[in-house]
Image: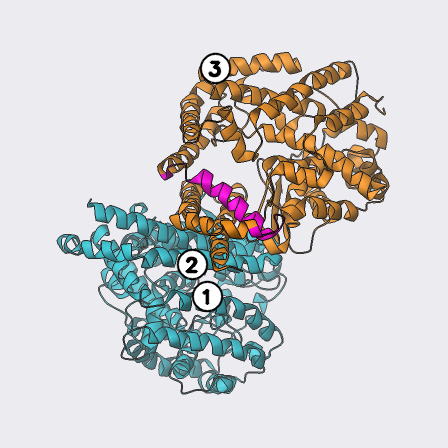
Chain colours: A orange, B cyan
Amino acid sequence: MSDALTRLRSRLEDVHGLDAVTLLLGWDQMTFMPPAGTLLRARHLGLLQRLGHEKLIEPETGRLLEELRPVEDSLDPDSDDAALIRQARRRYEKAVQVPPELTAEMIWAATESMPIWVEAKASSNFEHFLPALERNLELRLRYIECFEPHEEPYDILLDDFEPEMVTAEVRRIFDEIKPELMSLIEEQRGREVDDSFLTGDYAVERQVALSREIVDLLGTRPGAWRVDPTEHPFAAGAGIDDIRITTHYYPDNLDSFFATVHEYGHGLYEHQIPRAIESLPIGTGASLGLHESQSRLWENLVGRGLPFWRFFYPRLRERFPEQLGDIELGRFHAAVNKVQPSLIRVHADEVTYGLHVILRFELEQEMVNGRLDLRDLPQAWNAKMKEYLGIEVPDDARGVLQDMHWASGSIGYFSTYLLGTVMSVQIWERAAEDIGELDELIERGEFGPLREWLGENVHAHGHKFSPQETLRRATGSTIDAKPYLAYLKRKFSAPVAA
Amino acid sequence: MSDALTRLRSRLEDVHGLDAVTLLLGWDQMTFMPPAGTLLRARHLGLLQRLGHEKLIEPETGRLLEELRPVEDSLDPDSDDAALIRQARRRYEKAVQVPPELTAEMIWAATESMPIWVEAKASSNFEHFLPALERNLELRLRYIECFEPHEEPYDILLDDFEPEMVTAEVRRIFDEIKPELMSLIEEQRGREVDDSFLTGDYAVERQVALSREIVDLLGTRPGAWRVDPTEHPFAAGAGIDDIRITTHYYPDNLDSFFATVHEYGHGLYEHQIPRAIESLPIGTGASLGLHESQSRLWENLVGRGLPFWRFFYPRLRERFPEQLGDIELGRFHAAVNKVQPSLIRVHADEVTYGLHVILRFELEQEMVNGRLDLRDLPQAWNAKMKEYLGIEVPDDARGVLQDMHWASGSIGYFSTYLLGTVMSVQIWERAAEDIGELDELIERGEFGPLREWLGENVHAHGHKFSPQETLRRATGSTIDAKPYLAYLKRKFSAPVAA
């Protein structure tokens, strides 16, 4: 290995190590940290992010990247080293555009906004949150100005969450999806699906055991995972052998189960990154969208499918005989797939979910392009909820204040949820084609072949390529809404078992 | 504030922040980390230590310290700023003597030694551990050579754990203690104390509740502490509002209770550091010895005293009526103070404990001065156990392999346990004098006055002064074994309640 490459590698290992420790500290904050430690934690997270950023933008990084140009050209573009140099160059060239003071200001503003958002949501008081939101947006607009003009200013924000994806492409996909979802919802409106038995006495300690059972069943290497309770489920961890997923146990429903399966998908992506690249910035998921494709695949394509429940329903019933003893498989499967427009994105079903995302993406366009005064955001939100989902929003806590993303400064993030959902169907269909009899395997509780297919075709690439290139390598195609729409129609236009 | 001081402060905040995150990652490793994450964790700990070290020894630190000499001279030496500059200078001047490669080698050797020690202890095979120990010792000897010659080479190691303490002083104190402890043990040899009821069915979940009860009772600010199970109890945490203590629950005895009270003492020290210095290197305990004075004070002077048990024994009995229902207070108190030479340091009583430490201190002298071939270490250990405690060591697992310190490279650490125990009595007696009626307060379960006295007289100084200067400010005297020896004689020469 060239000396410059060795030095770049070791520098990037430091950057990635700081990222990994940051993730772990975030996990700790949301699971076990004593609440009084919040302010100090914000300071420590800021420190780690700053040190990583400094390490990345030091002139030495630029010098090494310059020196490595001929090396890069001589390498197989698919090799780890070529990918590492390519990705480092991309990240470096973005990072050096941004003055460290602005980076620090953005981190600090987000830190300060979070508790204000918590208060505002608790009291459903948008006015209380407004100044913090204005500040976060203003900083993002200053961030955009650091870069050469793009086709659309929003492109710059989006690129941080979904590298090399542009706004126009997202708009094209979402415009294709929106009317189809709305008509599917219309179609469902008459249907009566009984899901009353999903609410009831679901003892938390039995749900805890269930979460562990399903994670073990879907499959992990031993001694490498944790499942812990938290407020808003997420997946984190420090590396491929230290995967931490979280879920939220409600004593009166089974939502924790689907949250666990969802987070399993995220965890598995990081768990199956090749050991050779685990300590490098290319040793992680390629984007938020591709990450979401993995969580959605396990949650929806596996975890809400009939084959899965044919296998797993007897086990679930055994754990909750009082609630489910009288409920047949068909009724249970219909209930967990009930389409019902509702207020909260994270609880939305497969069909309505997309419209929650599209609404946010559209509002972000207006915000970033200055076409919407932030004071009018609740009205704009509520109008779209009415238009897309036919729902009246009773208060801002269950409306515009429901998500933490804007409070944390993450403007441009939401679309990745739907992009990931779209990609999940493309990946699922290709996996089914390659594996053959995937439904039958799942019906027998055999998840190994799917896990391995994902490992070889998606996870093995880590962040070596752009998300779209990764998807192309896995499926032969870049993002395409058609399989997703066809899947929804097949699943939800068919007569529902009752 | 001068610009140089502002810059030094911010630099030292980074160093201290990295130390705090390191502590937290250590806590996570010993409590919740999936076991497969061990290797990666070692890498991340190494990264944080290296970044902190680099930040400290950068030439800019030296320049700032030079520039600040006149500022330092003009400041009140008791002020936070003067203490910060003083301590930074001391730390910087030590750190720059050591080549970063040696620092990295020491961290790495310790990381590699730990699992080897675990295996060696499990199979009681000293030979298996020997090469790792040789390597750690050799690196420490190279470390010593980095510095100007001291009176004794061991001084340099000791100074890292107990700043400004010298070997000759420790030897003087230990030589004063050793014959007294041996004669106290001799005196106890005939006594029969029944402690059979301390072994039995002590349900772990009741011990868990007990640990929380006692920590709340001794007193903390709300929402700032955690108590978690681990293998070897320790205290850690990220700062004054994020204190994490650990304990080990055995299903057949009450050791967890005393471990919790011990760790409470460590936790309280960090918890009561003044907010104004919490983010700086002076915002922590002054030394391992002074830290141990706090844990020993709560464990022994409070937690094994009759006033405490007059108050607390009814509560304990209520939790374990099957075990303790028939046992009177006097018998219980005698049992938890039983003197009995035994193999394992961490389980030793107040009288024999000191000899376990002295033995290790003496062996370390031989090791560092090259007077002992490491191959002969088990024999030397066993001979001293026989001489000091009259005990035959049946195997190395319960002998020379019992502690992890040498595996982690911590040669020079052990003496701080006994130095701390000695200081705990000095501090206790001065607190009792200042507070008045301390026994009566404790008998009523009122721990606030003691907590506050410690806060004002010990904890408030953080690491602003050397440990001995801190002790002098708290008690009017530097370290002195007489109060400790008088206390032991009073307590253990008196006829024991039976």
Disc number lying in front (3 or 1): 3
Q: Are marks 3 and 2 in contact (CB under 8 Å)?
A: no
**Residue toward you, B440 or B9:** B9
Counting from the top left corner in percent of width and height, residue B46 is at 47, 60
Q: Which residue is mark 1?
A: B107
| Same chain check for tags 1 and 2 | yes
In the image, residue A431 above or below residue B75: above
**Looking at the picture, do discs 3 and 1 lie on one chain?**
no
Range of residues picked out in magenta: A74-100
A316 or B331: nearer the eye?
A: A316
| Residue B386 appears in the figure | no
Q: Image check: B410 left or right of A214?
A: left
Q: Chain of mark 2?
A: B
- Asked whether disc 1 touches disc 2, contact meaning CB atoms under 8 Å apart, the reply is yes
Could you tell which of marks 1 and 2 lies nearer the N-terminus? 2
Q: Where is residue A437, by image quadrant?
A: top right
**Circle 3 sits on which residue?**
A372
**Image quarter hosting the C terminus of chain A:** top right
- Checking the image for residue A136, the label placed there is none
Three-letter code for the amino acid on which mark 1 is drawn: Ile
Mark 2: few, some, or many residues within 10 Å (few <14, many ≥20)? many
Amino acid at pointer 2: Gln
Element assignment for label 2: helix
Q: Residues within 10 Å of mark 1 (few under 14, many from 20)?
A: many
Along the horizontal axis of the image, is B429 left or right of B347?
A: left
